[in-house]
Every structure is written in C-alpha cells, then in structure tokens.
Amino acid sequence: MKHSNTNTKARKPFVILAATALTVLLAACSEKPQTAGTTHSSAEHKAWSGGQKSFNTAGWTPGDKASWEAQIKQRNRSQNEYVRMGQ
C-alpha cells in the first residue's frame, strides 16, 4: 500500500500554525511582573545622608538636608531652558 503525500502536505501548514501559536502563547507567559515603587531604598537611608565622594558637589555637606535641598533646586534651575538662556 502506498502512502499518500496529499495528507502530509495538507497537515504541514496546520503544524506550522500550531507551533507558531504555541510559541506566542508561551512567550506571553514569561513576562515578569512590573511594579511601581522603590524597592531599592530603605526608610533608614535618606538621600541627603551622602553617597560616594566622587558624586558630591561643592556647597553640599553630607548629612545636611537643607544644603541637599538647595543643591537639588540649583540643579533643577540649571536644567530649565528659559533660565539658562536668560529669558
């Protein structure tokens, strides 16, 4: 008895489609959950307490909240295009 190639040819697109659908479904299951929040900081570490000395700027004293806030305000003013251009 001879095997028919017609049955195999008709099944090939279905197998390709099923494999593609399975791949897409499995890829969708692998996404990691995205959460908003600060998972890298702790409540006991304050931003003004200091970091590496290479990141410190003149006029800021590590541990002084007021000087830290003044430096943040100055940095924000420097990023404002209207202030930088004198308009």
Image (cartoon, helix red, strand yellow):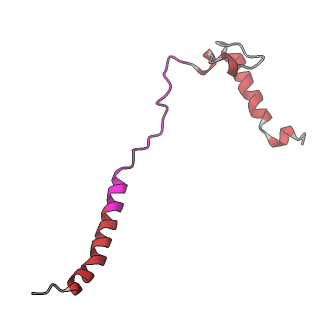
Q: Nearer the viewer, residue 5 or 42?
A: 5
The x and y percentages for residue 1 are: 9, 87
Which image quadrant is residue 68 in? Answer: top right
| Farthest residue, direction front | 1
Above or below, comparing residue 39 to residue 43 in the picture: below
Which image quadrant is residue 66 in? Answer: top right
From the viewer's perspective, is 33 left or right of 8?
Answer: right
Residue at image position (90%, 39%) is 86
Q: Nearer the viewer, residue 32 or 21?
A: 21
Which image quadrant is residue 46 in? Answer: top right
Q: Main secondary structure of the magenta part?
A: loop
From the viewer's perspective, is 83 left or right of 24?
Answer: right
Above or below, comparing residue 25 to residue 68 in the picture: below
The x and y percentages for residue 37 are: 48, 35
The x and y percentages for residue 60 are: 73, 16
Residue at image position (31%, 77%) is 13
From the viewer's perspective, is 16 left or right of 84?
Answer: left
Is 41 contained in the magenta span?
Answer: yes
From the viewer's perspective, is 16 left or right of 58?
Answer: left
Above or below, comparing residue 51 to residue 31 in the picture: above
Q: Specify start and end residues of the magenta stretch as a single range.
A: 23-45
